[in-house]
């Protein structure tokens, strides 16, 4: 069966907190841009409908954040996400249907549009690439409240796509790509929109980091630790080296082939240094794990020696299903069974056929699981079929979360003399025989009533 990686709770809590921070920045930034676009259009740097859509997306993500949502809030978040999706769809359709009403003109009146075209000659609109990214964002937000694993994977894949689109556009801005400023090209996206999409993608990825694809990055294993360290280098170093090759002071004095060679060498050097650094960290982590494992094995060996040194009682460990998982020498001395004969077997093999038919083995474990501990006395069969009187204590073993991990069973073989002494100590005081013998009165001959009374008294008298 395929094992799912465990999650690093500290890493997950930090990422969830950063998801809220990133989304909050998107909300605040979009509110500011929307206010500027409505109150001071000449100074606006974003279309008001685009800013409003970012506001809807940010609020939807905040509302749909796990452990913070309720049914009314979830409905509101789904409605806002649907608006984001529909706005993107309408704007994309209007690209191919020129006569169709455009949603990015929603907050502009006809007179207002004419004044802007007359006096400023430039109108902030929603680009097709922005519309496509809004469609992806709305779809990802609609998948967020779905509790299935496939929905989490789909949402994170869409978030990765949104982040890649924003990252690509950001690189184009840093490298002064001319295609961004040519009309009719679908690549152009305003710099504020690029910034918001990158933050929105990070918020979507970090909102549920313990699920889906992100689970491979948030586990405490060495591969996840290395990947978390590699991501910043993978994003920053190539971009920085590419920018240095394009805009460095020596770019005009050397050929493009020489610049490409410098870029390639720089990437190799940074990659080698990074690999060496991570190899050193992994080796340290491996050595620390070895020390912990050796200490754990030494502790287990000491515990095993302690348990095996106890020979007058059996100490047995059972799994939650009642199968034997540990067997000490005391158990072998009492029952004559060796470890190879009992490990992995059901504990019902230590009961008589009559107890098995009555369900006593399952009853004992059920009572121990319910009460924490259960004690019982009775006859138990040995390997050769002989019986011995035992006192058995069942103790349920649970972890910090209350999950049942198994049972600890302690069996004591009580001899006959010890059993009689124990019974005499626990016998009620009303059962004790009087110190002075008591002789009932001799009945009168011929008195049938007295004879019947004497017989009844003798029948109810305690045995000495």
Image (cartoon, grey):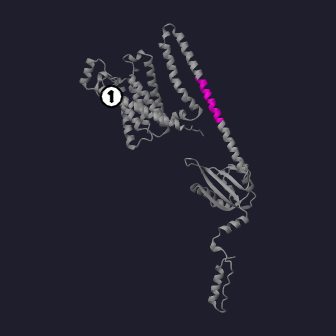
Q: Residue at x 53, y 24 (%)?
A: 233
- Let me know if residue 283 is in the magenta part: yes
| Residue placed furthest toward the left | 111
Residue 213 against residue 323 in the figure, above or below: above
Q: Residue 356, position in %: x, y?
A: 65, 59
Residue 397 against residue 288 in the figure, above or below: below
SS category of the residue bearing label 1: helix
Residue situated in front as seen by the camera: 139 or 426: 426
- Let me know if residue 434 is in the magenta part: no
Q: Which residue is drawn at 48% across and 31% down?
A: 157
Horizontal side of 410 relative to 39 (left or right) equals right
| Residue placed furthest toward the bottom | 446
Residue 211 seen in the current view: no
User: Which corner quadrant holds the N terminus?
Assistant: top right
Q: Residue 92, position in %: x, y?
A: 37, 26
Residue 94 seen in the current view: yes
User: Which corner quadrant holds the C terminus?
Assistant: bottom right
Q: How many labels does the image show?
A: 1
Segment tinted magenta in the rendering: 274-290
Give the residue number, with chain letter if any, for mark 1. 34
Q: Residue 292, position in %: x, y?
A: 65, 38
Judge the density around disc 1: few (<14), some (14-19), many (≥20) Cα neighbours within 10 Å. Answer: many
Horizontal side of 198 relative to 412 (left or right) equals left
Magenta-drawn stretch, dominant element (helix, strand or loop): helix
Horizontal side of 136 relative to 433 (left or right) equals left
Q: Residue 160, position in %: x, y?
A: 47, 29
| Residue placed furthest toward the top | 253
């Amino acid at each position: 069966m395929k094992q799912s990686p465990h999650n690093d709770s500290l890493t997950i809590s930090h990422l969830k907190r950063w998801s809220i921070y990133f989304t909050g920045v998107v909300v605040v930034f979009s509110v500011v841009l929307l206010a500027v676009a409505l109150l001071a259009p000449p100074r606006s740097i974003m279309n008001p409908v685009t800013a409003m859509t970012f506001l809807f997306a940010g609020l939807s993500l905040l509302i749909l954040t796990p452990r913070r949502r309720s049914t009314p809030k979830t409905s509101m978040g789904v409605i806002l996400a649907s608006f984001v999706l529909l706005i993107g769809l309408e704007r994309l359709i209007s690209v191919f249907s020129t006569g169709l009403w455009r949603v990015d003109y929603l907050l502009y009146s006809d007179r207002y549009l004419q004044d802007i075209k007359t006096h400023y000659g430039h109108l902030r609109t929603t680009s097709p690439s922005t519309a496509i990214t809004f469609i992806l964002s709305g779809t990802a937000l609609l998948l967020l409240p779905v509790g299935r694993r496939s929905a989490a994977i789909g949402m994170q894949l869409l978030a990765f796509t949104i982040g890649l689109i924003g990252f690509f556009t950001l690189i184009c801005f840093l490298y002064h790509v001319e295609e961004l400023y040519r009309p009719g090209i679908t690549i152009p996206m305003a710099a504020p929109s690029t910034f918001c999409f990158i933050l929105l993608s990070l918020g979507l990825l970090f909102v549920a980091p313990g699920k889906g694809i992100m689970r491979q990055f948030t586990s405490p294993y060495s591969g996840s630790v290395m990947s978390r360290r590699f991501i910043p280098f993978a994003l920053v170093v190539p971009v920085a080296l590419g920018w240095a090759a394009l805009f460095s002071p020596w770019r005009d004095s050397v050929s493009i082939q020489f610049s490409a060679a410098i870029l390639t060498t720089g990437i190799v050097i940074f990659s080698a240094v990074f690999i060496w650094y991570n190899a050193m960290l992994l080796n340290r982590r491996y050595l620390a794990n070895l020390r912990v494992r050796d200490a754990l094995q030494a502790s287990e060996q000491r515990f095993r020696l302690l348990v095996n040194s106890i020979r007058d009682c059996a100490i047995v460990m059972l799994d939650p299903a009642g199968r034997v998982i540990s067997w000490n020498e005391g158990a072998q001395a009492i029952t004559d069974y060796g470890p190879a004969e009992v490990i992995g077997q059901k504990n019902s093999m230590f009961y008589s056929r009559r107890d098995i038919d009555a369900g006593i083995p399952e009853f004992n474990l059920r009572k121990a699981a319910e009460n924490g501990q259960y004690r019982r006395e009775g006859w138990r069969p040995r390997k050769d079929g002989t019986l011995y009187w035992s006192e058995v204590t069942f103790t349920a073993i649970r972890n910090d979360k209350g999950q049942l991990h198994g049972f600890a069973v302690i069996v004591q073989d009580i001899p006959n003399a010890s059993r009689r002494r124990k019974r005499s100590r626990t016998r009620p005081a009303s059962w004790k025989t009087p110190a002075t013998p008591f002789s009932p009165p001799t009945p009168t001959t011929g008195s049938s009533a007295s004879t019947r009374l004497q017989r009844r008294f003798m029948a109810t008298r305690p045995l000495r």
